[in-house]
Image (cartoon, rainbow, N blue to C red):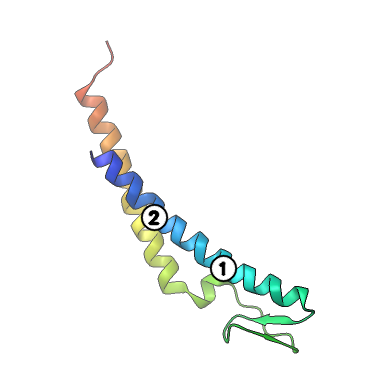
Amino acid sequence: MITRIGVIIFTIPCIILLTLYGIELSAATDCQQLGLYYDAFSKQCTDIKPAFSSFYMRNAFLVNIMLIIASVGSAALIIGMVQSKRANPAR
C-alpha cells in the first residue's frame, strides 16, 4: 500500500512541473514563430530581447517544494519495497 502511495506522491509533482514548463515553452515558441521574443516575466511577446531567466529562477519556490514532495514519495517507494521484501522473502 505504501508503495502505491509513494508512486503517486513521486509522480504527481513531476507531471505538474513538466506541464507548467511545457505551457511556458509553447508560449515562447509561438512568439518565436512570429519573429518576436518571449518575456517570461510579463508572459508576453516583445520586440526587444529580454534578459535570460530560467524556469527555476522565476519559480524557485514551486520547483523546490515539488522536488521535496517527490523526494518524500521516493522515500515512501523505497520503504514500501523494503517492507514487501521482508514480508515475502524469496524461497
The disc placed on residue 88 is: none
For the point 51% across and 62% down, the residue is 19
- Mark in the foreground, 2 or 1: 1
In the image, 32 versus 90, the foreground residue is 32
Task: Give the position of the N terminus as an image quadrant.
Answer: top left
What element does badge 1 sit on?
A: helix
For the point 53% across and 75% down, the residue is 57
Question: Is residue 74 shown left or right of residue 79?
Answer: right
Instruction: Farthest residue to the left: give it.
Output: 87
For label 1, the crowd category at 10 Å Cα-Cα, with few meaning under 14, some 14 to 19 and many 20 or more, is few
Residue matched to label 1: 23
- Residue 12 x/y as whole percent: 39, 55
Q: Earlier in the sequence, mark 2 or mark 1?
A: 2
The disc placed on residue 12 is: 2
Q: Distance between the residues labelled 2 and 1?
A: 17 Å
For the point 47% across and 62% down, the residue is 17
Vertical comparison of 63 with 52: above or below: above
Residue type of the residue flagged with mark 2: Ile
- Residue 8 x/y as whole percent: 34, 48
Residue type of the residue flagged with mark 1: Ile
- Residue 77 x/y as whole percent: 32, 41
What element does badge 2 sit on?
A: helix
- Residue 14 x/y as whole percent: 45, 56
Vertical comparison of 15 with 51: above or below: above
Question: Is residue 40 shown left or right of residue 11?
Answer: right
